[in-house]
Image (spheres, rainbow, N blue to C red):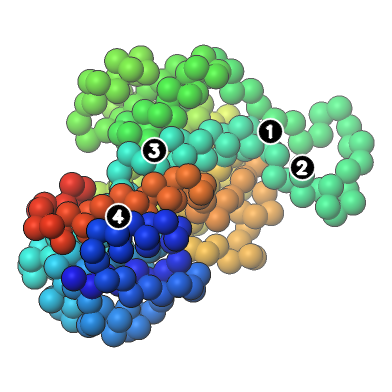
């Protein structure tokens, strides 16, 4: 069987695929492919290792219905039409677990950086603005002993809660579609209704998939219900918060600050007003971006394709 790898990944993962007997056609480039080029490349192969977030819509699935399997290198799959894939009998896999700790680290980084206005203050050094501006100039806010609200207490949310509890003795509350008894016990979390989550959180962090239910879940009404002293963190997907509502909420001081690893659209345009705010920290979607984690993600994707090659079920199948 032939597999198309759509972007540069660690060489050892390419070696692994070859050792397993697969013929690899490799786009050894860091450029994101256009869907039309991806379709043309997949015409000649049986399997696809889709690196990054190239959208795989119904048209792609129709055009590549001969594929025997698609492995994603992400835990999120909102960029893929899973129904269309299932319609053509194409199994699709994602990469759960292997990036949970790294993404939780990113939420932790944003919580701390935002609470101390770290990006803004660091940026002043480069601009030659490291001056004594007064005892009370652009002060941060404490995290210790405060309440962390988790929207989506799954693998990543639970890991972030565990870290926040261990490091800062934070009290954990959460809201999910359904209760997660195991994680509740692990991090001593209290289940609350959505409004309570908004009203009680000092830091509110989003760790859920983007679906039609969660799209723009955090809008102006929600920000108005949050504490004026609270921080909003999103490391999941940019479309889960309504960006212009978030900007207004920050301008009107309805919430204290925001830390974002995800935006809508991505990349964020450089003239976005969020980038001018001292109480906002934005990262360019680096949640899983460590060598160790990206290697683990590519390896997991490769193993799912090897399973198809061996006539087995994909271990991380998400549409069958
Ligand atoms: C994921 O895996 O969904 C991440 O957002 C990609 O870094």
Quadrant for residue 4, please give it. bottom left
In the picture of the structure, the residue carrying the numbered disc 3 is 100
Residue contact at pointers 1 and 2, CB within 8 angstroms: yes
In the picture of the structure, the residue carrying the numbered disc 4 is 301
For the residue labelled by badge 3, is the local secondary structure a helix, a strand or a loop?
helix
Give the side of residue 271 with respect to residue 56, left or right.
right
In the picture of the structure, the residue carrying the numbered disc 2 is 121
- Name the residue rendered at 57%, 39% in the picture: 110
- Kindly report which numbered mark, 3 or 4, lies closer to the viewer in this rendering: 4
First in sequence: mark 4 vs mark 2: 2
Across and down, in percent, residue 18 comes to 30, 63
Residue contact at pointers 3 and 4, CB within 8 angstroms: no
First in sequence: mark 1 vs mark 2: 1
Across and down, in percent, residue 85 comes to 15, 66
Give the side of residue 281 with respect to residue 158, left or right.
right
For the residue labelled by badge 2, is the local secondary structure a helix, a strand or a loop?
helix
Residue 10 or residue 223, whichever sits in front: 10
CA–CA distance in space, label 2 to label 3:
29 Å
Instruction: Characterize the local packing of mark 3: few (<14), some (14-19) or many (20 or more) Cα atoms within 10 angstroms.
Output: many
Quadrant for residue 173, please give it. top left
């Amino acid at each position: 069987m032939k597999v198309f790898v759509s972007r540069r990944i660690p060489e050892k993962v390419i070696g692994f695929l070859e050792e397993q007997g697969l013929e690899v056609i490799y786009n050894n480039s860091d450029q994101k492919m256009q869907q039309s080029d991806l379709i043309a490349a997949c015409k000649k192969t049986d399997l696809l290792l889709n690196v990054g977030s190239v959208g795989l819509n119904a048209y792609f699935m129709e055009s590549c219905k001969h594929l025997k399997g698609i492995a994603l290198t992400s835990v999120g799959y909102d960029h893929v039409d899973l129904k269309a894939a299932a319609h053509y009998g194409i199994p699709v896999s994602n990469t759960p677990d292997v990036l949970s700790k790294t993404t939780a680290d990113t939420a932790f980084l944003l919580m701390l950086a935002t609470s101390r206005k770290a990006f803004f203050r660091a940026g002043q050094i480069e601009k030659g603005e490291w001056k004594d501006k007064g005892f009370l100039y652009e002060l941060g806010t404490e995290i210790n002993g405060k309440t962390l609200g988790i929207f989506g207490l799954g693998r990543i949310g639970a890991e972030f809660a565990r870290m926040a509890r261990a490091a800062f003795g934070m009290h954990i509350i959460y809201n999910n579609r359904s209760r997660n008894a195991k994680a509740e016990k692990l991090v001593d979390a209290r289940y609350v209704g959505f409004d309570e989550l908004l009203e009680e959180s000092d830091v509110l962090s989003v760790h859920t998939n983007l679906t039609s239910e969660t799209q723009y879940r955090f809008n102006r009404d929600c920000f108005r219900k949050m504490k004026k002293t609270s921080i909003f963190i999103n490391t999941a997907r940019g479309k889960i918060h309504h960006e212009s509502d978030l900007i207004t909420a920050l301008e009107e001081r309805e919430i204290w600050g925001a830390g974002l690893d995800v935006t809508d659209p991505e990349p964020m345009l450089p003239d976005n007003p969020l980038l001018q705010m001292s109480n906002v920290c934005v990262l360019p979607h680096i949640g899983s971006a460590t060598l160790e984690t990206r290697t683990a993600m590519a390896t997991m994707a490769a193993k799912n394709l090897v399973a198809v090659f061996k006539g087995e079920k994909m271990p991380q199948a998400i549409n069958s």
